[in-house]
Image: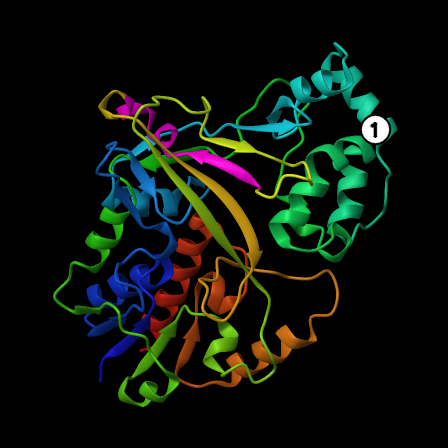
Amino acid sequence: MPIAIVGAGLSGCVIAHELADAGFQCEVFESRDHIGGNCHTQRDPDTGVMVHTYGPHIFHTDKADVWAYISRFLEMVPYQHRVKATVKGEVYSLPVNLHTINQFFHKAMRPDEARAFIQALAEPMENPQTFEQQALAFVGKDLYEAFFKGYTTKQWGMAPDQLPASILKRLPLRFNYDDSYFNHPWIAIPKEGYTPLFEKLLDHDNIHVHLNHPFTPAQAKDFEHVFYSGPLDAWFDYRHGRLLYRTLDFEKQILTDTQDYQGIAVMNYPDANIPYTRITEHKHFAPWEQDRHRGTVIYTEFSRHCEENDIPYYPVRLAQGQTQLEAYQTLARETEGVTFIGRLGTFQYLDMDVTIDQALKTVHTFIQQH
């Protein structure tokens, strides 16, 4: 019997490729009309800009094996991701660094002075549990309210004191002028976008892809095993109610008479009175080809609660009250013949490199056992 892979995103395509190479027959089912999931990219015909259809994806990792894996399929071009934030009419660098601190407080501190200054502002807590507690212990009230509180409330749709501290722990605080967004040794974007990765992963005689083809649990009996990357609660027909996911709306503008809209790939808008979270300008994700463009493409990004017919982008884990999630996780462990994978299937906020790493470990374990 063949193996079913539900979802042609990063997890599903990596697993399908590895299974096919090991001799398994794979049927990939994708409910959308394209492969690549939320990493799908395509070139805008009016401007020539490579557009990240579902929002920007920057590949970054400290995992040498994952870097080697993705480099087998794509020409990865080094890329330094930088982010700015407009706060009350002024532009600052993110993540918070020495320049941000000096500019915000109208000072000219050296690193040691700034470190002591922030420590005096911080509100230490032995074991912060919520995003707000972590932020106050991290940078103090002023920087928290300027850069984190409003943005986080808009991004997650709830107050920061309801969210876990782990969300903020992913972001650095620097006491030098380094404004690179990521610390990882490998930071890059594919020269021709991400879609070729999925095309190459699925280009195998043992893989058959079905687009515009949702998969239901009733179909599982026709397969030796199912790898499922859809929403965890959907597989169980929402038996314990709907888990919380966020979705994104993009207001896309194609500007053929503008060569550079904002001068940077990402501009955040943390102010609570501004309805959107950020504006992304996609030509800046491929600086090596900007001379080819006949204009620019920008996305104004709005985050909201995911409704029944929306595309879920990422799960919302609360600081407390995980009994509903635990009930679904118990069902998943008890379900034979199905492996739940990816952001939605495992209900985790996963970066691309972690997604690949988890997919490889999952599929190699399966191959060894079969």
Residue 61: in sight, yes or no? no
Tell me if residue 247 comes above or below residue 297 in the rendering.
below
Q: Residue at x 51, y 67 (%)?
A: 346
- The residue that appears at 77% across and 33% down in the rendered structure is 139
Which is nearer the eye, 33 or 287? 33
Residue drawn at (26%, 68%), measured in percent from left and top? 19
Q: Amino acid at mark 1?
A: Gln
Over which residues does the magenta segment extend?
Answer: 277-290
Q: Is residue 367 left or right of residue 177?
A: left
Rendering quarter of residue 112: top right
Of residues 339 and 369, which is closer to you in this image? 339
Residue topped by disc 1: 119
Tell me, yes or no, if residue 184 can be seen here.
Answer: yes
Residue 282 drawn in magenta: yes
Image x and y of residue 2, in percent = 22, 80
Whole-percent x, y for residue 103 in the image: 70, 16
Q: Secondary structure at mark 1?
A: helix
Q: Quadrant of residue 89?
A: top right
Of 64 and 215, the residue lying toward us: 215
